[in-house]
């Protein structure tokens, strides 16, 4: 059987990325051009700045991805691109580049959902057995997703307000941590204790939804109150307390979903999947489940948790196998739903 090589593009937010993926499993090349430094002084991603950076680097990193994989256009079988959700102006750069490449080469085009991509980062690590269940946690999303087969996804739980990563970034700003704050807060959390006992919202509700705005407000109020009375709080304990609350609710609901849906594989996906506390806690709790419902656990490599084109190439391979292609009418869809 012939190998299938997909050239993938990702430009939904603040990383421009290209990759060549073989048979949906093997990374032949991966280039990630991050713009984080340009956005940091604004405390978050500035859409206009993001689009300009994407357009500056996308052709160069397309050449680099082909070169690093020792391939040329004639070795490629399809072109994949993230078309949503994300920032519309940012998505349009990747979509336009992929459409132009598809038109010039005659190669088929595959539009990929960014969230499907985050989940399929797992496929680059290990074989997914279906049905699978994913906890997908990023800067824009916090969802529990049931995956019936490689192309059918159903969201069974969602956040009612802030995404988990967004909450990290917002409380990080209060502590004076540069955007994106998740990684630093995670490191601080390991040096402190849960002394503040912040709320754990919706933990005992019998659905799979989340809410992080109450936690964020409790955190901010605690800091403001301490400021007013000139009390200095320990930043490590604050981080540890915040993280304990996030990890508690995420793992509690995930374990309950695993017990109900009995998936063969559990996948952690999205930028927050890099969180050490969350990885350790979920691994431990799943390990303690009875053998007949214990799923295989796939935690993607740290460098594949954040936005990257490799995961888009992995998801695109599944669509390719199912014969699902896009055409020249593919457009960016900033609020695309799985
Ligand atoms: O998936 P991603 O790269 O972009 C989106 O699609 O949103 O996720 C970025 C988010 C940011 O909010 C960042 O603070 C968070 O992931 N993040 C983390 C960690 N590393 C990145 N959050 C908690 N712990 C981490 N170690
Ligand atoms: Zn993402």
Image (spheres, rainbow, N blue to C red):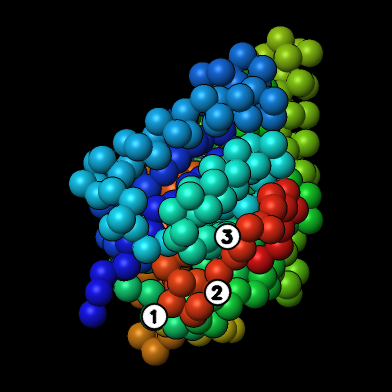
Viewer-nearest residue: 147 or 241:
147
Q: Which residue is mark 2?
A: 324
Q: Are marks 3 and 2 in contact (CB under 8 Å)?
A: no
Dot 1: what SS? Answer: loop
Residue under numbered circle 3: 111
Q: Is residue 229 above or below residue 94?
A: above
Nearest to the observer: residue 164 or residue 127? 127
Quadrant assignment, res 76: bottom left
Q: Nearer the viewer, mark 1 or mark 3?
A: 3
Q: CA distance from mark 1 to mark 3?
A: 24 Å
Q: In the image, what residue occupies the spot 45% across and 60% down?
A: 107
- Report crowding for label 3: few under 14, some 14 to 19, many 20 or more residues within 10 A (C-alpha): many
Give the residue at x 53% y 62%. Answer: 110
Image quadrant assignment for residue 290: bottom left
Q: Residue at x 50, y 78 (%)?
A: 323
Q: CA distance from mark 3 to mark 2?
A: 9 Å
- Image quarter of the N terminus: bottom left
Circle 2 or circle 1, nearest the eye? 2
| Residue at the disc numbered 1 | 129
Q: Few, some or many C-alpha atoms within 10 Å of disc 1 (few <14, some 14-19, many ≥20)?
A: some
């Amino acid at each position: 059987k012939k190998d299938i090589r997909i050239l993938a593009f990702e430009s939904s937010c603040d990383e421009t990325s290209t990759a060549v993926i073989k048979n949906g499993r093997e990374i032949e090349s991966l280039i990630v051009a991050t713009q984080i430094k340009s956005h940091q002084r604004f405390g978050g991603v500035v859409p206009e700045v993001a689009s300009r950076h994407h357009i500056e680097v996308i052709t160069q990193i397309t050449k680099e991805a082909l070169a690093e994989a020792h391939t040329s256009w004639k070795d490629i079988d399809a072109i994949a691109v993230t078309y949503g959700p994300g920032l519309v102006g940012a998505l349009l750069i990747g979509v336009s580049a992929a459409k132009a490449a598809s038109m010039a080469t005659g190669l088929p085009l595959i539009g990929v959902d960014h969230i499907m991509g985050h989940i399929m980062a797992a496929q680059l690590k290990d074989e997914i057995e279906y049905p699978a269940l994913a906890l997908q946690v990023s800067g824009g999303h916090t969802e529990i997703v049931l995956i019936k087969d490689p192309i059918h996804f159903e969201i069974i739980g969602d956040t009612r307000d802030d995404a988990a990563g967004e909450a990290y970034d917002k409380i990080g700003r209060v502590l004076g941590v540069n955007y994106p704050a998740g990684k630093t807060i995670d490191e601080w959390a390991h040096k402190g204790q849960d002394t503040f006992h912040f709320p754990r919202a919706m933990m005992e509700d019998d659905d799979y939804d989340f809410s992080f705005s109450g936690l964020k407000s409790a955190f901010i109020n605690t800091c403001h109150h301490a400021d007013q009375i000139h009390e200095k709080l320990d930043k490590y304990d604050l981080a540890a307390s915040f993280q304990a609350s996030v990890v508690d609710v995420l793992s509690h609901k995930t374990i309950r979903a695993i017990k109900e849906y009995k998936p063969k594989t559990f996948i952690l996906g999205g930028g927050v999947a890099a969180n050490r506390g969350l990885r350790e806690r979920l691994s431990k709790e799943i390990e303690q489940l009875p053998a007949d419902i214990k799923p295989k656990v796939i935690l993607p490599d740290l460098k594949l948790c954040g936005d990257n084109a490799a995961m888009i190439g992995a998801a695109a391979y599944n669509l390719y196998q199912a014969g699902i292609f896009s055409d020249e009418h593919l457009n960016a869809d900033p609020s695309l739903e799985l």
